[in-house]
Amino acid sequence: MNRIKLYFIFVLFFGQYALEAHTTQRSTIFLDLSERRVALEVYLAVNELRLAAPELNVALESLEQPHFQKSIITYMQKHLLVTGESSKDFPIHYQSISMDNTDLQPYLVISAYVDAPKAIKKFNIHCNAIIHRVVSHKIYLSVRGDFNKGVFEEKGKIIDIFNYQHFDSTFSRTSGGSSGFFVMFQHGMQHIAEGSDHLLFLFTLLLPIPLVASKRAWNMQRKPLKNSIKEILKMITAFTMGHTLTLALATFNLVSFSVQGVEILVAVSIFITALHAIRPLLRRFVFLTTAVFGMVHGLAFSETLTLFHFDPLTQGISLIGFTLGIETMQLILTLLVMPLLICITLVPRFFYYFRITGALFAMIAALSWISARIMEKTFFITNFFDNLPQQGIYIFALLLFMSMFSLNYFFYMQRTKIYK
């Protein structure tokens, strides 16, 4: 008898926590609002979906087959509706269905959109997927992107929660305004300013520019300032053309890529550029190679834009704003760093050690990123390189100090020659 009592106490006590742990998995609907489109990205918790719709179990195991995807779309058409101010249902266009493991839990990801005239400001969304049978489940409704308001939040801003007693929610869409363009411009600048891999690539690219290349080595002789400026402009133009091309293609889903693969290629581009800073490996094909590396970095840049599913016109405006932000920050950094590098070249021997040290530093960083991406692990040294942008002010101060030292030493040597 006592054992039975203990058993029931155990079930009541620990069963409560087991139930709470089970119900913590929630579903989410992300909204991306633009001038002529309302995009929806639905994350449905698979374990709960199996309980609510056991007839979909086979379809969930065979998503690659179109007729199984149709059964999931049929289910969604019954349980997800979007209406306008006149209570007229908008046809929902389903784009893709895939499986994703977020926080080690399987989610069914459904991408869809509604074409809605910009004159319509208010919408009602009805959703009772899963919760029509699993009463403990919740579906979070979040605005992830609202171009006209300048809202771009990767995790979304929760505006409502659906449950078994609450299936409907109303949301509004603003029209006009240029907030989204300027916010995307800021995102572009921030992407460069906070991306240690892109910053290191730009730095290693600039390192040998003031020098004259021979067949196998960089000479101590400096280029005329005019030639250095021309080469900088050519380099930036080649890199810009490369990354703009792939950024545009990826933004409009014309190319697909592996994020892990792109991150590895970005690190490889840093390693090769660092080798070039030590010895002129790319002397004849430097601009072509820079353009190719720009294409790789453009794919990395596109992660920000491909997250938001706006209509094509809004996506294009976002692309322009983001690209201009990238170019502006690159230009600012070049204008800050290049004069300092030219000053350091006034003392050839000092610049030689500075160039070799900087290139080796970039190579170590690149190798650490390549290892981390391939092994899918984070190392201490990787964290160190990832956090470099936070020390940007100190790195710039160090460059400024070295350039001032080089200038003073150069003028000191010039005065010494005059007196002699």
Image (cartoon, rainbow, N blue to C red):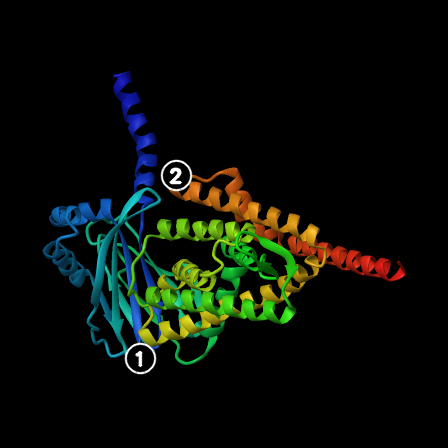
In the image, taking residue 94 as reference, residue 346 lies left or right, namely right
Nearer-N-terminus badge (1/2): 1
Please, what is the three-letter code of the amino acid marked with disc 2?
Met
Q: Is residue 188 above or below residue 140?
A: below
The residue tagged 2 is 375
| Residue closest to the eye, 343 or 35 | 343
**Element marked by disc 2:** helix
Residue at 30%, 67% (x, y): give it: 39
Question: How many angstroms separate mark 1 from mark 2 (CA)?
Answer: 49 Å
Residue at 74%, 56% (x, y): give it: 406
The residue tagged 1 is 120
**Element marked by disc 1:** loop
Which residue is situated farthest in the right direction here? 419
Residue 326: percent from the left, percent from the top?
Answer: 49, 66
Please, what is the three-letter code of the amino acid marked with disc 1?
Ile
Determine crowd level at label 1: few under 14, some 14-19, many 20+ residues with C-alpha closer than 10 A: some
Residue 314: percent from the left, percent from the top?
Answer: 37, 74
What count of labels does the image hold? 2
Q: Quadrant of the N terminus?
A: top left
